[in-house]
Image: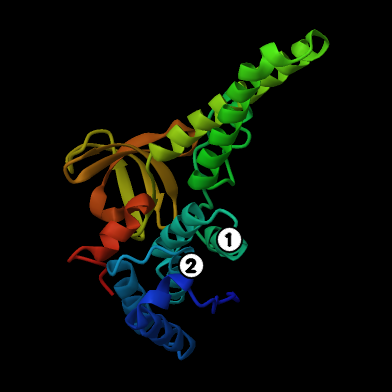
């Protein structure tokens, strides 16, 4: 499997020479095959507060080469959340997913949801709010000038006003959903059981394998209630999965990742 490795110099690092050096050290370690060293240095950047899609993309590549597909998937997914247009991350994500045991997709939202929020996917959170603000302001400005327009074109202005306000509202809803989404996770161990109840003694409902992705509906102590494809639900141990929206916090914790 051939990975394209990004050598983009991060503008974020320009203010701090230490970060530049750490990034360079990580890249050099990666190319020399010292993937553990590369991972350690990328994590140092993340612990220093660097949140850049390229760092997480490169980290995902390093994890992949150590055989940690679950962690690799989490890194690519987080990189895409930071930058949905990072095509190399999406390509590598698809390659790794195709190497998982079951090649499971994420559970999909209902069809009506996907049609209503057709522009929801592939647009970053910041861009969504910018577009929402634009449509909302233009819509209400149009409404405010309607009385000043000739009667012959007022009906067209009213129509445009309604369209702009509706689009603004849809993008506002999209932005809110992106601010408070269902957390998504991935299995980072070889195999784990999803139980009926959050207990070791509870019967197993189904099995999940490394690289399987899911929605996390609830977190309770050391357990998470997950929903997989086909609306299968079950409780899995928190230590067996990784919620990628929490990836920076997890990597910055004292526990980190056991190499």
Q: Please tell me whether residue 28 is drawn above or below residue 209 in the rendered image.
A: below
> Pointer 2: residues within 10 angstroms few (<14), some, or many (20+)?
many
Q: Please tell me whether residue 148 is drawn above or below residue 228 in the rendered image.
A: above
Query: Residue at (57%, 29%) from the top-left corner?
Result: 137
Q: Position of residue 6 (x, y in %)?
A: 55, 75
Query: Residue at (42%, 43%) from the top-left corner?
Result: 214
Question: Mark 2 vs mark 1: which is more N-terminal?
Answer: 2
Q: Which mark is residue 86?
A: 1
CA separation in Å, label 2 and label 1: 9 Å
Q: Secondary structure at mark 2?
A: helix
Q: Please tell me whether residue 193 is drawn above or below residue 77 in the rendered image.
A: above
Q: Quadrant of residue 95?
A: bottom right
Q: Secondary structure at mark 1?
A: loop
Q: Which is more toward the observer, 55 or 161?
A: 161
Find out whether the residues at labels 2 and 1 contact each other: C-beta distance under 8 Å: yes
Q: Position of residue 57 (x, y in %)?
A: 48, 67
- Is residue 63 visible in the rendered image? The answer is no
Residue at numbered disc 2: 57
Q: Position of residue 166 (x, y in %)?
A: 60, 22
Q: Position of residue 247 (x, y in %)?
A: 34, 57
Quarter of the N terminus within the rendering: bottom right
- Is residue 219 visible in the rendered image? The answer is yes
Farthest-out residue, bottom:
32
84 left or right, relative to 28? right
Farthest-out residue, right:
152
Q: Which mark is residue 190?
A: none
> Pointer 1: residues within 10 angstroms few (<14), some, or many (20+)?
some
Q: Which is more toward the observer, 8 or 134?
A: 134
């Amino acid at each position: 499997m051939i990975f394209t490795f990004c050598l983009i110099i991060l503008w974020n690092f320009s203010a701090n020479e230490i970060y530049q050096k750490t990034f360079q050290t990580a890249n050099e370690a990666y190319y020399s095959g010292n993937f553990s060293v590369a991972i350690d240095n990328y994590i140092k950047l993340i612990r220093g507060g660097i949140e850049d899609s390229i760092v997480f993309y490169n980290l995902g590549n390093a994890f992949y080469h150590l055989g940690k597909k679950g962690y690799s998937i989490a890194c690519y997914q987080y990189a895409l959340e930071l930058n949905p247009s990072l095509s190399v991350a999406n390509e590598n994500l698809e390659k790794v997913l195709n190497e998982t045991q079951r090649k499971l997709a994420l559970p999909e939202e209902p069809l009506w949801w996907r049609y209503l929020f057709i522009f929801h996917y592939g647009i970053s959170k910041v861009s969504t709010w910018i577009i929402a603000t634009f449509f909302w302001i233009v819509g209400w400005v149009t409404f405010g000038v309607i009385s000043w327009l000739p009667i012959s074109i007022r009906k067209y202005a009213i129509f445009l006003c309604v369209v702009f306000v509706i689009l603004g509202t849809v993008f506002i809803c999209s932005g809110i959903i992106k601010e408070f989404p269902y957390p998504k996770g991935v299995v980072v161990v070889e195999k784990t059981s999803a139980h009926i109840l959050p207990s070791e003694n509870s019967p197993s409902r189904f099995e999940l394998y490394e690289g399987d992705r899911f929605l996390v509906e609830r977190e309770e102590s050391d357990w998470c209630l997950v929903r997989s494809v086909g609306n299968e639900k079950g409780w899995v141990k928190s230590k067996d999965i990784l919620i990628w929206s929490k990836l920076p916090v997890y990597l910055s914790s004292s526990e980190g990742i056991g190499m």
